[in-house]
């Protein structure tokens, strides 16, 4: 199975939802957060454009999507969009000349992409370091631009997503050990491997707002997990860690300060 992976396009600044082109290089597309702001008028038309090109579009929320709104309201809008997509697929299903892909909203979501490949996805958030809590609170725009959102809620959301991931991986390992697992998140699961940490920010007092060390967690250690792709850090990586898992991030970053190594055509193959 082949999946084209992109994140952190930041089409909200400058507004470029109608300008940014994704050329299909695989049947499946994964958009791993910070694509834009859900409240922007161009956001959903951009997603619809991708649905006309790809068989499946995976989407999860980054920290920018809820700006000028709340997490609850933003998720409601995504669910409403997902429902409308499903209805449209039924309507268009009889017309074989019109292509319209499946939309998979990854919010503690399991999606069986094939008979032996399972996608698990969530935002993940991060475990904020208590000693740097104030620096994170004042240093990240999330706590200014997302309504009713605090560091405590951010950390609680991380703990919820992590518990869900661990439970899902453990259950699959017990009940369906033949499956290969793909994990998609927005926040990074790596802090201790230099290959996945931007040296410019390695000692930053706000780094715990971006990444959490999951190396001791079942969702990271399980040999069933063949790929973990993420965004948020604006630092691109593509390597295979010691246990054989592919670790990938393919982030464009802001238009004015784009991340090195971004490849709009990047495709990862799950064998």
Image (cartoon, grey):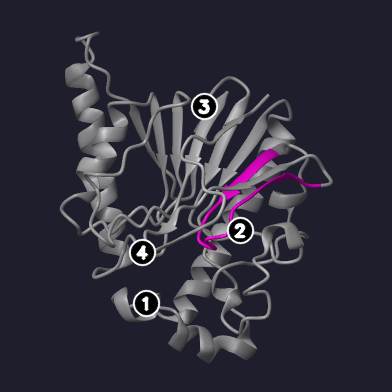
**Disc 4 designates what residue?**
64
Apparent side of residue 262 relative to residue 75 in the rendered image (left or right): right
Q: Nearer the viewer, residue 231 or 162?
A: 231
Membership of 234 in magenta stretch? yes
**Residue positioned 67% across, 64% down in the render:** 197
**Is label 4 in contact with label 3 (beta carbons under 8 Å)?**
no
CA–CA distance between discs 4 and 1? 13 Å
How would you rate the neighbour count of disc 4 (Cα within 10 Å): few for under 14, some for 14-19, many for 20 or more? Answer: many
Q: Secondary structure at mark 1?
A: loop
Q: Secondary structure at mark 2?
A: helix
**Residue positioned 60% across, 88% down in the render:** 132
**Disc 1 designates what residue?**
149
CA–CA distance between discs 4 and 3? 27 Å
Percent position (x, y) of residue 134? 51, 91
Q: Which residues are magenta?
A: 226-241
The tag earlier along the polypeptide, 4 or 3, is 4
Q: Secondary structure at mark 4?
A: loop
Q: Nearer the viewer, mark 4 or mark 2?
A: 4
**Disc 3 designates what residue?**
113
The tag earlier along the polypeptide, 3 or 1, is 3
């Amino acid at each position: 199975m082949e999946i084209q992976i992109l994140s952190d396009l930041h089409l909200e600044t400058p507004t470029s939802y109608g300008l940014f082109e994704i050329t299909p290089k695989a049947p499946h597309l994964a958009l791993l957060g910070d694509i834009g702001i859900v409240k922007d008028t161009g956001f959903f038309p951009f997603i619809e454009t991708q649905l006309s090109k790809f068989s499946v579009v995976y989407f999860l929320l980054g920290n920018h999507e809820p700006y000028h709104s709340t997490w609850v309201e933003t998720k409601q809008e995504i669910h409403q969009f997902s429902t409308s997509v499903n209805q449209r697929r039924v309507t268009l299903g009889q017309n074989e000349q019109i292509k319209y892909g499946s939309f998979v909203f990854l919010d503690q979501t399991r999606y069986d992409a094939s008979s032996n490949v399972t996608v698990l996805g969530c935002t993940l958030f991060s475990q904020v370091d208590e000693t740097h809590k104030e620096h994170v609170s004042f240093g990240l725009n999330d706590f200014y631009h997302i309504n009713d959102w605090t560091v405590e809620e951010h950390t609680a959301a991380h703990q919820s997503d992590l518990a869900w991931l661990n439970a899902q991986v453990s259950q699959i390992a017990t009940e369906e050990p033949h499956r290969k697992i793909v994990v998609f998140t927005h926040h990074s699961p790596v802090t201790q491997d230099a290959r996945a940490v931007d040296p410019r920010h390695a000692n930053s007092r706000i780094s715990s707002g971006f990444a959490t060390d999951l190396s001791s967690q079942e969702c990271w250690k399980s040999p069933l997990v063949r790929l973990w792709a993420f965004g948020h850090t604006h630092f691109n990586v593509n390597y295979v860690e010691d246990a054989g898992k592919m670790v990938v991030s393919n982030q464009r970053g802001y238009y004015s300060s784009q991340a090195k190594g971004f490849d709009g055509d990047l495709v990862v193959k799950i064998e």
